[in-house]
Image (cartoon, rainbow, N blue to C red):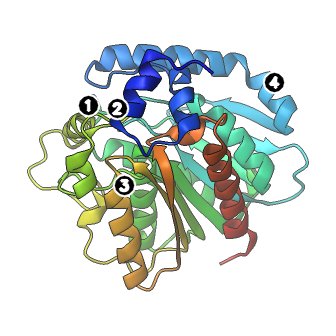
């Protein structure tokens, strides 16, 4: 197999990177987070491609997919297994994108697979993006949709004793923050939290954040911009914005958390998992060797297929039992 110039360059810079991932890198869209308009255009085109494939996703995974955007409510995508009878568990899935790009539609393929493998109703909001809508807008949208489903559980046909929240990257950070808000409000019980490479710490002081300045997909300079967009002009930083700033992590639900070896976000995820454990929370933590941020989408690599299968199985287990 011949090696592309990109693969050769990346492989030389990161010798521990999984060889199959090095080869697969060219399949990722070229997204420059420093050019927000350009990044949104690239990812918007990818989302359009995903939208055109919804019928095929429904057929492949035997799920019904609906877009909801009306009445001033938070827009969302809904994925329901066609075999579902009666009330289902709920998984609120929050897309990634550094708080400033991305969409629920872009992750429709994963959400359909998640619904098929867990039997859950998967709902993914199109939350407002920074910098046009800085914190707390995105979090407010995520919690508002969760509350709407919880309050109207009969109409959504969900079992409120089996509510889960998940997300990846910035969506993982929002999932943690939404779970924290639900805990503090004391109204909605969250049964399970599942996050991949969550973006949690605006201080950018971890060893991995200092080391990984030129990694694929995500790097320190992108993280700096992401937090600048999300926090806006805030003079004080709320733990609901940057959850690692929370002093008390007790009362979180059982948590499944994954990190990638070559990811600036690696160490804040590891640190957060350790803090949850010390707070008495049940945690399952996976650090995948040779991987980088969002490499789990490159399913031509065996490590990515393993990551996907283990994540889906963890969510199915987490939602199997009521609170």
Q: Is residue 152 visible?
A: no
Q: Is residue 300 visible?
A: yes
Q: Secondary structure at mark 4?
A: helix
Q: Is residue 236 left or right of residue 75?
A: left
- The mark closer to the camera, 3 or 1, is 3
The percent coordinates of residue 116 (x first, y second) are: 80, 47
The percent coordinates of residue 198 (x first, y second) are: 41, 53
- The mark closer to the camera, 3 or 2, is 3
- The answer for how far apart the CA atoms under marks 3 and 4 are is 34 Å
Q: Secondary structure at mark 1?
A: loop
- The mark closer to the camera, 4 or 1, is 4
Q: Secondary structure at mark 2?
A: loop
The residue indicated by pointer 2 is 100
Q: Which mark is residue 298?
A: none
Dots 2, 4 in contact, CB < 8 A: no
The residue indicated by pointer 1 is 131
Q: Tell me which label, 3 or 4, sits earlier in the chain.
A: 4
Q: Which mark is residue 266?
A: 3
Q: Which mark is residue 56?
A: 4
Graded by Cα atoms within 10 Å as few (under 14), some (14 to 19) or many (20 or more), the crowding at tag 2 reads many
Q: Tell me which label, 3 or 1, sits earlier in the chain.
A: 1
- The answer for how far apart the CA atoms under marks 3 and 1 are is 24 Å
Q: Tell me which label, 2 or 1, sits earlier in the chain.
A: 2
Residue at far front of view? 1
């Amino acid at each position: 197999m011949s090696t592309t110039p990109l693969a050769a360059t990346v492989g030389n810079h990161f010798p521990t990177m999984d060889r199959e991932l090095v080869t697969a890198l060219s399949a990722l869209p070229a997204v420059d987070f420093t050019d927000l308009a350009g990044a949104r255009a690239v990812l918007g085109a990818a989302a359009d491609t995903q939208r055109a494939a919804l019928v095929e996703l429904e057929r492949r995974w035997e799920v019904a997919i609906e877009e909801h955007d009306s009445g001033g409510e938070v827009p969302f995508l809904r994925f329901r297994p066609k075999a579902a009878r009666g009330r289902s568990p709920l998984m609120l899935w929050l897309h990634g994108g550094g708080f400033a790009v991305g969409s629920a539609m872009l992750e429709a393929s994963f959400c359909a697979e998640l619904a098929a493998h867990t039997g859950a109703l998967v709902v993914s909001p199109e939350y407002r993006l920074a910098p046009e809508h800085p914190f707390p807008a995105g979090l407010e949208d995520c919690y508002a949709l969760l509350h709407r489903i919880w309050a109207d559980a009969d109409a959504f046909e969900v079992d409120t004793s089996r509510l889960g929240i998940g997300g990846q990257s910035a969506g993982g950070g929002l999932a943690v923050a939404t779970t924290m808000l639900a805990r503090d409000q004391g109204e909605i019980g969250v049964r399970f939290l599942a996050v991949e490479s969550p973006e949690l710490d605006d201080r950018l002081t971890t060893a991995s954040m200092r080391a990984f300045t030129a990694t694929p997909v995500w790097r320190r300079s992108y993280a700096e911009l992401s937090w600048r967009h999300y926090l806006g002009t805030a003079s004080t930083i709320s733990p609901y914005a940057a959850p690692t700033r929370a002093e008390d992590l007790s009362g979180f639900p059982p948590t499944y958390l994954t990190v990638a070896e070559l990811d600036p976000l690696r160490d804040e995820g590891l640190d957060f998992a350790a803090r949850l454990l010390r707070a008495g929370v049940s945690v399952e933590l996976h650090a995948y060797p040779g991987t980088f941020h969002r490499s789990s989408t490159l399913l031509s690599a065996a490590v990515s297929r393993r990551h996907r299968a283990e994540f889906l199985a963890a969510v199915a287990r987490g939602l199997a039992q009521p609170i």
